[in-house]
Image: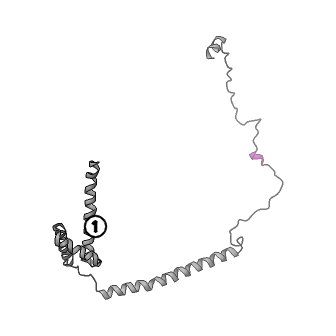
């Protein structure tokens, strides 16, 4: 059990330090209640660690307030005009996109209504006869080839000896 208390003690101290820091920060920012203000003033009068923290925070606040502010690249009036110009352009863009969308819908509807076969290219067709007459030049006589086809050598399978059949199984 003493080991557990020893490991929890730093955690409790860290939580207490954090709470004191937040309380002092609220006090310096003017966000503390009347009770919190009195509590901080008592701690500042009696606790050297709290006094040190207060001094560090005051120096930090002073340093932030004395940081040089970089000059702006353009006058404030010009920045305001640019913002208003951008705001005024936005509705124009919306109207332009809306007009294009309406035009696209109109073109799509027009294309859907018009008959398609009038505008499609077509090729002239010759009248087809139902009678098929083979051309004599294209006929191939399969039973009388133009070139002599040599006969392939036919091999006969050799019988397998019976003693080798037994060894296979």
Total number of numbered discs in the rendering: 1
Q: In the displayed structure, does residue 5 sit left or right of residue 48?
A: right
**How far across and how far down the image is residue 67, in percent?**
20, 77
Residue matched to label 1: 19
Question: Taking 163 as reference, is 10 above or below it?
Answer: below
Q: Which residue is depicted at the point 28% across and 76% down?
A: 35
**How far across and how far down the image is residue 60, in percent?**
19, 73
Whether 134 is among the magenta residues is yes
Nearer to me, 7 or 149: 7
Q: Which residue is depicted at the point 68% across and 72% down?
A: 119
Q: Classify residue 167 by image quadrant.
A: top right
Whether 135 is among the magenta residues is yes
Quarter holding the C terminus? Answer: top right
Q: Which residue is depicted at the point 77% across and 62% down?
A: 126
Nearer to me, 38 or 94: 38
Nearer to me, 119 or 147: 119
* Residue bounds of the magenta highlight: 132-141
Q: Classify residue 30 by image quadrant.
A: bottom left
Observer able to see residue 119: yes
The kind of secondary structure element at disc 1 is helix
């Amino acid at each position: 059990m003493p080991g557990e208390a020893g490991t929890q003690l730093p955690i409790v101290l860290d939580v207490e330090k954090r709470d004191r820091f937040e309380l002092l920060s609220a006090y310096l920012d003017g966000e503390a209640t009347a009770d919190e203000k009195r509590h901080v003033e008592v701690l500042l009068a009696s606790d050297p660690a709290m006094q040190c923290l207060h001094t560090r925070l005051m120096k930090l606040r002073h340093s932030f307030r004395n940081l040089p502010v970089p000059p702006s690249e353009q006058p404030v009036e010009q920045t305001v005009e640019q913002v208003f110009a951008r705001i005024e352009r936005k509705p124009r863009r919306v109207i332009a996109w809306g007009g294009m969308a309406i035009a696209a819908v109109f073109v799509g509807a027009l294309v859907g209504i018009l008959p398609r076969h009038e505008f499609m290219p077509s090729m002239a067709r010759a009248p087809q006869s139902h009678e098929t007459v083979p051309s004599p030049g294209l006929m191939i006589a399969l039973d009388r080839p133009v070139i002599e086809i040599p006969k392939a050598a036919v091999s006969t399978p050799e019988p397998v000896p019976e003693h080798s059949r037994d060894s296979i199984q």
